Amino acid sequence: MAVRQLIHWLAAVAAIALTSCVYPFEPEIETTDSRIVVEGSISVGGTSTFKFARVIPFTASDKDVSQLTRELQVTGYIEGEDGTRVESYQGGWDDRGADYETKSYGGYSPQARYQLFFDTYLLNPGQRYRAHFEETYTQAVYETDWIEVCPAPVIDDLSYILNHERSELNVALSMHSATDSHFRWFYEETWEYHSDLQASHYLEPGAMFDPFTGEYQPMDALFKYPSGQNKYNCWNTFRSPEIKIFSTSDQAENRFTDLEFHRVASSNQKLQVLYKLTVYLEAISENAYLYWKNIEDNTNNQGTLFSPVPSQMAGNVHCLSDPGAEVIGYVSAAQTATAYMYYDDWKEKFYNGPGVDWANITIEEFTDYNEFASWYSRGYLPYTVIPADMSESGQTTFQWAKARCVDCTLAGGTKVKPKDWPNNHR
Amino acid sequence: MRKRFLTLLLLLPLLPAGLSAQDLEVRRVSLDSLVRFLDREFPEHYYCVQDAAEQATFSVSAPRAQFVDAAFEQLRSSGYVISSYGPYRFVLHGKSIRTELPTGYFDRGGSLLDDSGLQQFLAEQSAVATFQNKVYEIGEPGAKTSGKAYLSGHVRDVSSGEPLTGVSVYDDKTGAYSVTDADGFYRVALPLGDGQLNLSGYSLEDMHLTLKVYDDGVLDVVMKEKVTSLAEAVISADAVSHHRDAKMGIERVRMDVINKIPTAFGEGDIIKAVLTLPGVKSVGEASSGFNVRGGSTDQNLILFNDGTIYSPTHLFGLFSAFNPDVVSEVELYKSSIPAEFGGRISSVLEVRGREGNSNKVEGSLGVGVLTSHFHVEGPLAKGKTTFIVGGRTTYSNWILGLLPENSNYHGGMASFSDVNASLTHKLNDANTLQASFYWSRDGFSFDRDTTFRYSNLNASLKWRSRLSSRLNLTAVAGYDRYGAQFTNDFNEWSGYKVSNSVSQVFGKATFRYALSDAHNLSFGLNATGYDLRPGALEGLRDGSYVQPRELDAQRALEPALFLSDSWTVSPKLTLDGGVRLSGLLALNPSKFYLDPEIRLSGKYSFLDNLSVKAGFNTMSQHIHLLSNTSSISPIDTWQLSNAQVRPQTGWQAAAGLYWTVGSVDLTVETYYKRASHSLDYKSGAILLMNDHLVDDLVETRGKAYGVEVMAKKTSGKLTGWLSYTYARTLLQEMQDRGVETINGGAWYNAPHDKPHEVKLVANYKFTHRYSLSVDMDYSTGRPVTLPVGYYYYAGGYRLAYSDRNNYRIPDYFRLDLAVNIEPGHYLKQFTHMSWTVGVYNVTGRKNTYSVFFTADQAGRIQGRMLSVFACPIPYINLNLKF
């Protein structure tokens, strides 16, 4: 038998790349949606804060937003199954209401919310509570389901792990609970950092001209010497919008250990001096867990091949006056466990952000203080003054640098040192 | 190179002979039968090679001792040469007809003549090509005096010997019509007397055989591939099936057509080819699965050599699970689903593997940018056993490294492999056994912690038997398994692995019986035993906090009986009807469902080239895929119907008009479909390891309707099809769950509802060597659920959603071009090279795959869209044959 072997080979030669890309997308979404949003939890043993707002349609103008906000005023009470009743004691808009003018990094203005406070120090963790709200203008009435109080879980450890391979600091949390198996936490970061240059002299721009004569003030009046007004050390705070939830329902024990939940790159300025992370941990019910997970899926887990189809899940707040009206929000009752940790770069030397890059720092020298106004208007700030007897020119020389090099507040921080901050920088 | 085997065998029933112990007699038998008779009755081994033109019959009557001589005498008088070597006797036809042989030419112990005889035979075989001009006699004159006679046989490919499926076998005069089945088998009832039998199959040369029919008989036919003919043929295979067959909504695509459709990576892709057909949609370019006439992805039964494929794609849909080297063709039933198929309510996609070349060993080896593949096929025992083995693998994970960092896949890995094997053994003329095997595995990870793995396994054994001239049987038994695993190693103590699997054992027996000249019955039974493991959870290392746990296995038996009849009322009118009794016995707790299904269709031809058809089907489905993602995820679990989960049911009514103008087949089909008890998730349901999953499910009903218009041209310089589809698919939740009811209980768009679609697949041959392929796809953007607003909550902006699938992504458009250069026609040349140079997405349109909104660290929200193939992708394929 003649056997013929036929070898057939296929060579695909192409320098191809799988070219998937992400582009901005701006859909035209027409809607008049203005569902009410209720955020808050009954904090047993503390003050309970509830915040109210409405869904902002994508098509809404700033004016609409402001209108939506102004029309929303609420009163309410929290009641226990035993008949105890705690009335809200203060209403008003939170400070985000002042932020309208800061509109638009992403195109939307921050939202002001109406807030209510309740003194819930004396509530009994052993019984169920519910919250009741009424809108002042529309008289719409809302009520939550009866909510069981979840006791505080125990935080066993909050610490950081330095991952040198990936050049990142990982924050890890360990906790356990005797009773609950669903948890939510959020965290707040506070850090101290400094600007590139520590200026020895500071200008008071407001004092540049004499208000009566319109002439330059004497140099001494303009300059302040190192003092409490230094702009070298700053502090910044950031509350992460991330939703952190964890379920131990598939575990033999209600605990997790060294759960890494936050990463900070070693080049991040947060690690420059001293970094603090505070965790606020609560146990929540299974339904609350599903609700938070749904929010997370809807907002942050979209766009991949296997993303869940977004859907709006009903929470535990209902509109009594209009049962068909949807209310966004899930109210829990809990005791909060808190823990914090510090990272001190003076000890760890892990920070490898850009150091003082002298090549990028422009220092202008001049001797005529009458030029102050012109350098100031060009975005410069004084760095130091070289007295006549020490300067090369033999005249008092003024050194100025770009404002961002000497003013740490321009990087977003403040000069307000947090309470109990362990460093004694000012 | 030798040309070989163009055979056309004419087998006549062997007449029983033997008058007494001493006397033997045969009357009017064919050469073949005579030689078989000799072989049976006498100790020597007799062989013959029959001239295809042979029509002579032989009658021999002689005492046993002289019978052989008498028979040889007759044969010699008909021009045959008898050679002898040891105990072997060869009967070969001489070059010219001789009335007399020299005495002593036949010498029992004589010189070796067989070699020259064989050479003579082989030299003559090339002359058989004229067989269309001769008359074939079926049966013996006078054997039947009235009624009709049954002609059956196999149709095979001339060069590889593989069975040819879907060849129309028909008689123009009476309207008798048959299509060869998966084994190339056909059976038609023909009137007695003179007649003509036509055979027509896609890309095959049409055949017209002249017959003289006296009785039932067997006629095996070999057909050859159409030599590239630039002239227009008159009748196409599609035209024949449109105007003869009552079934509608059937699309058949052969592998050679599939290989010419441009794809992103240049490899022939079956699922991508299926997506070019009208009525078939998918949610996006990189998505596994497809939707047929509004059905969801789990409502398609995908069969590969009779085994059920649960995951038909590799690499999130970029490649289909089928190795093109080992596939002969695919057939998609989107409307008239034969009663022998069941278990899914939307469609059946039958992928038929090849049996392997029965004449010679050949193979291929390919190296591509992403994959390499090979296949080998050939005979193991010539004429008896053939095999085919194929495999593919990816040899690098670099594909994901190319993805942009913000696409969520950067830094991941992805790989797959698959293996196909099939062994076909012909026990005898009437019985064939075929063993098939398929295995595949996929693995990919999107980030450093999570990994997906899944695998398919199918093994089956098929027995095909011709039980009598009117009855044949196909019986299959097999095992299918799909398993998936998801690993999330985010933490040393809490990291976990979840796995699930579907296993099934199945048996199928299908009988086809020609009841009368007008009625062709098909009946049989199926049984499938399911064993579903919906979830097993375990920790990743010792000391893990994870409590190992397994969800209850779901087991059930799904028996089904079916009976269908194809009734040729007249040449103009054909009716098909069938019933299928499908049941499900769910275990633990026991629950039995019985779902009777009916299949009806009818055809009426006004003219030879103008027909109308109508059909009505009901279907039921006992296994459901639970998914809350728009594209199926490998870890999505399957759920059997049980005491709480009812079977899905659906019906479809359809009508169509078929008009053949020249070589163009124009088709208009319209349909209306309903489905009930399809499963969806409640908002916020947990997918994995949910003990109370049933509580998180909601039932939906669906309706779909549409019109598909297609013009198809299968011969000439220009071939291909152009189609337009208008189709709507809507869903509605069946329960009222208050504010949580999906879209308030109103009808809403299904995720694959794309009303307008235009598809073009065309190939234009400039010369015999050069051709241009075009693939064009336009469709309305698919519906998506977009946020309607945003709100500040828990430290960041969150998205507020309202109605489901109320918006659409921008319309989809893609044009692909490829130039195919076929090898030159130099037979003596050692290597034959063919090239394909193509560009996928020529216009570089940034088609939207998905849209999403992201909140940055500060909580600001921005809309984004992901485009999978955002620029033109060029490719070159080189095929070298030697």
Image (cartoon, coloured by chain):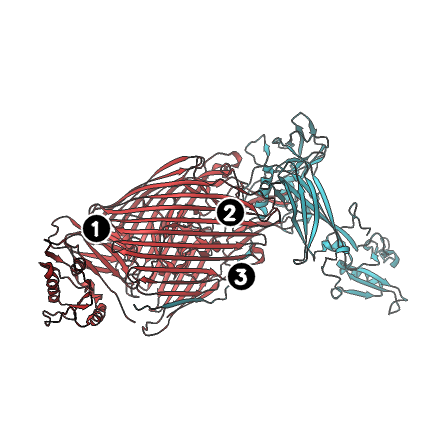
Chain colours: A cyan, B red
- Tell me, yes or no, whether the two marked residues, 2 and 1, touch with CB atoms within 8 Å: no
The numbered mark, 3 or 1, whose residue comes first in the sequence reads 3
Give percent across and percent down for residue B418.
44, 57
Residue drawn at x 22%, y 68% is B125
Give percent across and percent down for residue B409.
55, 55
Q: How far separated are the C-alphas under marks 2 and 1? A: 50 Å
For discs 3 and 1, the disc positioned in front in the rendered view: 1
Find the residue positioned furthest to the top: A83
- Which of the pair A274/B121 is nearer the observer? B121
Looking at numbered disc 2 in the image, what kind of residue is underneath it?
Ser
- Which of the pair B51/B45 is nearer the observer? B45
The local secondary structure at tag 2 comes to strand
The numbered mark, 2 or 1, whose residue comes first in the sequence reads 1
Q: Which residue is mark 3?
A: B398
Residue drawn at x 39%, y 35% is B592
Q: Which residue is mark 1?
A: B469
Quadrant containing the C terminus of chain B in the rendered view: bottom left
Q: Which residue is mark 2?
A: B499
Q: Is residue A258 left or right of residue B29?
A: right
Looking at numbered disc 3 in the image, what kind of residue is underneath it?
Trp
Is B833 drawn above or below residue A19 in the view shown? Answer: below
The local secondary structure at tag 3 comes to helix
- Which of the pair B359/B793 is nearer the observer? B359
Give percent across and percent down for residue A261.
65, 48
- Tell me, yes or no, whether the two marked residues, 3 and 2, touch with CB atoms within 8 Å: no
The numbered mark, 3 or 2, whose residue comes first in the sequence reads 3
